[in-house]
Image (cartoon, grey):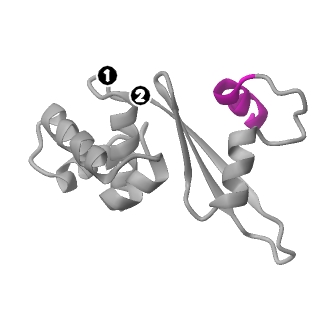
Amino acid sequence: MAVRCLKKFFGPRPNNLFLPEALAQWAQDRPEIPFCLVKEDRMLFVTWLDRSRKGARFFLLEEHTNWEKCLTAREAAVILWAARGKTNQDIAEIMGLKEATVKTYMFGICQKLGVENRTAAASYAEALPSLL
């Protein structure tokens, strides 16, 4: 299942024993910050988990579709992170954006969902089981 998910987002790789280059670079440089990749109407979230006494590390792959047709894939990714309690600065760092861009996305999300603030938008997202 994980191999199919990686193939969907990164394409075929010559050696399935190694992570795709972008993912391997992230794991080496900044594994404490979740990895996020948006491709068409799908989003991939990767989080490192350290659950072994021997120091082995595992990663969790989460794939989400654009659950609300009125939101773009980027907006859906922003609202997902907001629903998980991330600040605009956190979201910007996770997604490789500027904080002002995240604020713009959040404004657009609130407009499209017909809510007044980020808390209401995050609550809306939490109510949708296909998102979280």
Residue at image location 45% in from the left, 55% down from the top: 93
Q: In the rendered structure, which segment of residues is drawn in magenta?
A: 1-11
**Up-down relation of residue 84 to residue 121 (above or below):** below
**Up-down relation of residue 49 to residue 96 (above or below):** below
Q: Is residue 37 magenta?
A: no
Q: Residue 126: x, y in percent?
A: 33, 49
User: Do labels 2 and 1 touch, CB within 8 Å?
Assistant: yes
Task: Give SS at disc 2.
Answer: loop
Q: Quadrant of residue 63?
A: top right
| Alpha carbon distance from label 2 to label 1 | 7 Å
Could you tell whether 20 is left or right of 36 in the image?
right
Q: Residue 41: x, y in percent?
A: 46, 23
Image quadrant holding the N terminus, namely top right
User: Which residue is under mark 1?
Assistant: 69
Q: Is residue 86 visible?
A: no
User: Few, some or many C-alpha atoms within 10 Å of disc 1 (few <14, some 14-19, many ≥20)?
Assistant: few
Question: What secondary structure do most residues of the magenta stretch adopt?
Answer: helix
Residue at image location 71% in from the left, 33% down from the top: 6
Q: Quadrant of residue 21?
A: top right
Task: Give SS at disc 1.
Answer: loop
**Up-down relation of residue 73 to residue 62 (above or below):** above
Q: Residue 69: x, y in percent?
A: 31, 22
Tag 1: amino acid: Lys
Q: Is residue 6 visible?
A: yes
The answer to which of 59 and 108 lies nearer the viewer is 108
The answer to which of 78 and 123 lies nearer the viewer is 78
Could you tell whether 92 is left or right of 71 in the image?
right
Tag 2: amino acid: Asn
User: Which residue is under mark 2?
Assistant: 66
